Amino acid sequence: MPEFTPIKTRKVYEEIIDQLRELISTGTYSPGDKLPSERDMAQMLGVSRASVREAVVVLQAMGFLVVRAGEGTFVSKSINNETIEPLAAILSMERNPLAQLMEVRRILEVEAAALAAERATEQDRLKMVEVLNDMKAVADRSQQGVEFDLYFHFAIADAAHNPLLRRIIKTLDNMMHQTFLVNRNEMYSDPKTADRILGEHQIILDAILNCDSAAAREGMLKHLEHVERGLTT
Amino acid sequence: MPEFTPIKTRKVYEEIIDQLRELISTGTYSPGDKLPSERDMAQMLGVSRASVREAVVVLQAMGFLVVRAGEGTFVSKSINNETIEPLAAILSMERNPLAQLMEVRRILEVEAAALAAERATEQDRLKMVEVLNDMKAVADRSQQGVEFDLYFHFAIADAAHNPLLRRIIKTLDNMMHQTFLVNRNEMYSDPKTADRILGEHQIILDAILNCDSAAAREGMLKHLEHVERGLTT
DNA sequence: CGGAATCCAATGGTCAGACCACAGCTCAGG
DNA sequence: CCTGAGCTGTGGTCTGACCATTGGATTCCG
């Protein structure tokens, strides 16, 4: 039985997507560069403008391109940017039980804290200290406390110095931040709980400042376990 | 200085994307369901078919929809959503992702192995044993060996019983598998290296079968460190 | 001459309608 | 009953047009 592999009919807009991605990844177009107009690209490729647009909107949704109406289409400067939008879109759709999200967060952030303890630069350290101080200052106002809580986790993700890890963590954290904003506000409105969170952050920060990755790991693990318990209660 | 927030001009196709996502996430359309034809949706929404298509191609690229030409547009069966395509697309664009990629893999898969040791069902165990046996049987033929190597990691990811974790791991592994296929083939062509990899897999499998999460963690960590060393050499 | 209001060309955003290729169904003809 | 031709609906692509916004060139006035 000779194996006939089915012919894959390549759609025009998919071909355009691949060509554009190639041009971007090879550096032919660098971040910030302006692409030819849709009309010009259509003519150069020998296709209709509609097909070009279908490719452009996809690449825009994936974060590779930014389109400014009346101005042009540009290669995104933020390919190394902070979050992975399509991942966020996927997460926000599928019923992602809190337990699953928290488990992945636990895995990633615990190690991120350990890496931060090993790799944090002086600048990273200052940033983390600053955020935690801000958090202490507004500990009584729940809304801002929740914000700084998020920023503290971001600062640790930055200090781990792995862009991919950083982006995944920020995407997950940001999504949880939005989804469970109400619950978190309630948590922070209880002064006792707010103090406990603050204390846990302090422990993590101290461990990182001491370059003690084991302690950082341990501190983050306990912290996230507490957070999960608080959210599911 | 009163804060003027810039007006967000909502593009038609973005509105359609959101509406479709809402309809899917609320279950109005379930996985496998057929959506109305593009022409019908355009008429119902009071927009042109081109705008509907721009929305559909984006959702298709994100993996929410599956389009079969001449047949219709369908909601993806979540069962088939083993990877996160947009994440793969983003990864394939980064310039030197190997170190970053391997570090994230190490973090995720080490814990996945530990979780697998705790959660693997009888079916999971049989699957892992089967894959490893397959791998042993073809150990001399490099091409297939590389395939089964990948499947072994997939089986562990399955056994961790966290869909989000599973999808991220499979996306990362699959991408590395494609990107470094050549290197891996070389690795496997050396019988000594192939034997070592096989041995490491065996250690991990034994640990999981013994429900020894600590040993599974340890085994996977050493395995991935060896793999990374092999790829960077 | 300098600055400001105006105009205009380029670009993305949207639309309408057309044609093609393909999948699935119907139904006549063997 | 089975087969195959033809019809219908669908996605895939193209054409050409118009609108809205942007940014710079142009023009006009002090």
Image (cartoon, coloured by chain):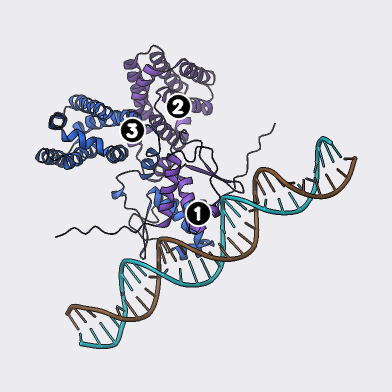
Chain colours: A purple, B blue, C cyan, D brown
Residue B42 horizontal/vertical position (percent): 50, 62
Q: Is residue B61 left or right of residue A138?
A: left
| Helix, strand or loop for disc 1 | helix
Q: CA distance from mark 1 to mark 2?
A: 43 Å
The image quadrant that residue B136 belongs to is top left
Q: CA distance from mark 2 to mark 3?
A: 16 Å
Residue A154's tag is 2
- Using the image, name the chain to which the residue with label 1 belongs: A
Q: Is residue B29 left or right of residue B111?
A: right
**Label 1 or label 2, whichever comes before in sequence order:** 1
Q: Is residue A162 above or below residue A210?
A: below
- Identify the residue at image location x=25%, y=38%: B182
User: Dot 2: few (<14), some (14–19), or many (≥20) neighbours within 10 Å?
Assistant: many
Residue A44's tag is 1
**Label 2 or label 3, whichever comes before in sequence order:** 3
Q: Label 3 sits on what residue type?
A: Val
Q: Label 2 sits on what residue type?
A: Phe
Residue B159 appearing in the image: no
Q: Is residue C29 above or below residue A182?
A: below
Single out the mark in the foreground, 1 or 3: 1
- Using the image, name the chain to which the residue with label 2 belongs: A
The image quadrant that residue D17 belongs to is bottom right
Q: CA distance from mark 1 to mark 3?
A: 45 Å
Q: Are marks 1 and 3 on the same chain?
A: yes
Residue D19 horizontal/vertical position (percent): 65, 58
| Front residue of this view, candidates B13 and B5 | B13
